[in-house]
Amino acid sequence: MTTYAVHTRTRASNAAAILLIGLVAVLVALPFFAGRSTIQDMFFILTMLVLAQFWNLLAGYGGLVSIGQQAFVGMGAYALFAAVILGGLDPVPSILLAGVAALIISIPTAFFAFRLQGAYFAIGTWVIAEVFRLFVAQWKTLGGGTGTSLPRSATKDMWFVDAITVLLDVKSSAARDILAYWLALALALVTIGGIYWLLRTRRGLALAAIRDNTEAAKSVGVDAGRMKWLVFLTSGFGTGLAGGLIYMQKARISPDAAFSVTDWTAYVIFIVVIGGIGTIEGPILGVLIFFALQSLLADFGSWYLMTLGGLAIVIMLIAPRGLWGLISERTGIHLFPIRRRLTGGKLDQLED
Amino acid sequence: MIWVDTVAQGILLGGLYALFAAGLSLVFGIMRLVNLAHGDLIVVGAYLILLLVTLLGLPPFLAALVAMPLMFALGWGLQKFLLNRTLGDDILPPLLVTFGLSIVFQNALLEGFSADSQRLPTDALTTASVAIGPLNLGVMPLLTFASAVAVIVGLNQLFYRTSLGRAFRATSDDPVTASLMGIKPASIFATATGIALIIVTIAALYLGLRANFDPNIGPARLIYAFEAVIIGGLGSLWGTLLGGIIIGVAQTVGAAINPEWQILAGHLAFLAVLLVRPRGLFPRAND
Amino acid sequence: MALLDTYGLTATYGDFQALFGVDITLGEAETIAIIGANGAGKTTLMRSISGVLRNAPGMVQFNGRDIGALAADEIMAQGVAMVPEGRKLFPSLSVEENLLIGTYGRRVSGHWSLGSVYDLFPILKDRRHSPGTALSGGQQQMVAIGRALMSNPRVLLCDEISLGLAPVVIKDIYKAVPAIKAAGASLIVVEQDIGQAMAVADRVYCMMEGRVTLTGAPDALSRDAIHDAYFGAGQ
């Protein structure tokens, strides 16, 4: 008699959970022993990771290849600046408004872009992002095409900054970076946890079914249309939060920078593709490789981007599941197991 | 009267956009591939023509003629050795590989030619204009529009009157059965992309003669081309010309109202068409 | 000397093995029929010979050459044309264009040309400007056969040409077979309709579960032997 058991956990994932708790503790404590430039680098890594996770949710799990994510970064960032400059709000709670603003514009964006299929969807999202950029450039009270800065009064009295100044005995400019870093860390953890949770629910399984075969998914009663909306709006909201946070830290904005397809979409795509699309681990590995390459090659300007582009092409051709795909194929390690693995019985030998 | 002139200018500008779009439309029609590096390839073509003009002292039109076989070879090689390997049911590989190519081309041009803007040399003919009734139209825009019409007529002849055109359509319908006819789908695709890059060279010639260009303007050309294709309906070449005209007219009318609204007006016209006719004005029946 | 041979031909789809060492021989100006139930491997055999499935180096020989490793377009150029299962006309092409494209990879002058194909199937001449897919099933089958003939092949592979057609239409299609044989081609006919197969074939191969279970001239095979070869003995 053969017995079957359904697992999503793996031994590696249990070890990973313990390691993860330790890692989070170190990351939370980082500002107590690391210098300001490390904190700034980590802020960059974490915010890019958030953008990468949301793009991966869209493209890797939802099959929606968007090259218009800069719309949500830009709108989130501009919403934060509007809330602070025009509404007189504190920047920290305004980050939430950034997410809400991006969520709101993702509704008409989806309405238009979902009329297009596949590659045309991709360029369609890009056009819509351009439309938002051109509209924002007309917004004269926020500097029009040249952009504007957050007023010093607003950044100086930001929530928590005083407390951090006292707690860590640093200047208020460093305290602002530390605050931004902690917020980015929280956002990254919530994002990864949230996506992991989503993918393990019934809806997450439906999502995988849609990605693999829309027609088959429909025939077993999965509503592909609603899932696409859910994924698109979720990633719009998350990308907007990240955009607001990034520009709260930068404190200076312009339409060309905030709606940059290179910074907020091309880099993000490269991170996901190089690390491994369709996995949670992939973007994490990808962002680390991306940061390492940037540190090594940043002085070479356009050679750096050529290398990134070339690397992404090579990986897509020879290892379409990215570096993490290669690693987990060789070792069988899944840190964030999502697949239900059926163990026991004959199927065990047949799997894969 | 000024409005008639604005619209006429817009129609002629549409010819340029149709030239940008025709190659994209051709490649999509045959292999369902959207090349995100298409705009950057137009810019590559413009720099190639510029190089031939400055190194060999050729006039731009002759330089474009010399550039055509080189661009054909580039397209053929790209398709044969790189893009054919991305074709399949999964839409991700072609998208991500051509997106990577776009970044590679842009930065290679930046490295080779710097970010300074360039222009192809113009002469008296290319800057002349002719009066047609009350309108005063530039020779260059007229020539661009006539070239766009010629390219579309030529492509239609190729598609519907030649053995190669039959092979294009057969391969587009069913590559496996096409191979039973002795057709090599991989070579057909490579030839199609090569032809698309010949059209790209014509587009590049007019791009460089009419305005400044620099390594970063490719993506915007891709977007105009894409809008023209979608407005016209996927796979319809005459539709693509009409799509180009709609974008061109929207842009000149927008610019006449407020110069800052030129590009925005084009995009909004595209979104309006998408709202009313999501499959474009002349959708192909069997898609 | 045989025109086309398979030697221990095997074929797999992923993990699934569809053919287990199939040997068949086709002589010059000969017609053989391959019969067998659904899933016996008949279509896989056709796909392997024609090169659509490309995994048979050393296992298929045509005209003294190993064609097992060649691609479909190369095999077609050598003179092995196929009428694929399900007809597979090109919807974007008219009837006449569907016929013309049959010569794309092989232009050999011989008996077959647009004119002689229209003589064989006169109805097609009247419909020559219609889209291929606007025709009835029987007429589409005529186009598919004509398309394969246009290259004047030495071997014509016919995969289930009666599938889905009414008996009277099937009879019409099979009326063309003697003319095709007379023009010099050798035929491999895959059929589920045993009666039709027996009527046109010089020899019959019966397949079951990826193997040849019976072979011989049609009049030398008893009904019981065919029944056993088709369904397995003792069924």
Image: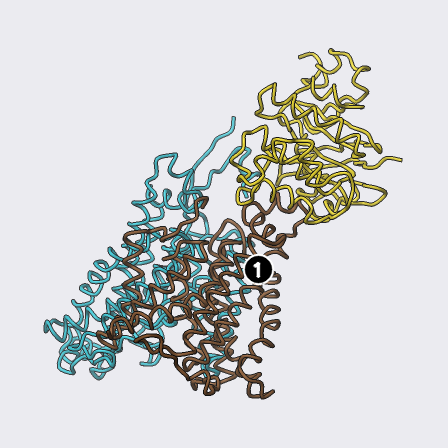
Tell which chain the image draws in yellow.
C
Q: Classify residue B207 by image quadrant.
A: bottom left
Task: Rate crowding at label 1 as few (under 14), some (14 to 19) or many (20 or more) other CA atoms within 10 Å.
Answer: many
The brown-tinted chain is: B
**Residue C79 locus on image (x, y percent):** 76, 43
Residue C156: image quadrant is top right
The single residue placed furthest to the left in the displayed view is: A88
For the rendered model, the colour scheme is: by chain
Residue nearest the viewer, comparing A59 with C122: C122
Residue C126 position within the rendered picture, expressed as x and y whole percent measured from the top left: 58, 34
Tag 1: residue type? Ala
In the image, is A230 to the left or to the right of B143?
left
Q: Is residue A56 visible?
A: no
The quarter of the image holding the N terminus of chain B is bottom left
Along the line of sight, the residue nearer the viewer: C40 or B275: B275
Number of residue marks: 1
Reply above or below: A39 against C206.
below
One can see residue C217 in this view: yes
In this view of the protein, which residue sits in the foreground, B217 or A148?
B217
For residue A49, what is the image quadrant? bottom left
The residue marked by circle 1 belongs to what chain? B
Dot 1 falls on a residue whose secondary structure is helix
* Residue A233 drawn at (x, y percent): 27, 54
In the rendered view, tell whether residue B26 sits above or below residue A202. below
Chain A representation colour:
cyan
Percent x, y of residue C139:
59, 30
- On screen, residue A238 versus residue B178, left or right, reads left
Q: Is residue A15 left or right of residue C66?
A: left
Q: Which residue is mark 1?
A: B192
Q: Is residue A251 above or below residue C32?
A: below
In the displayed orientation, state which residue is furthest to the front. Answer: B133
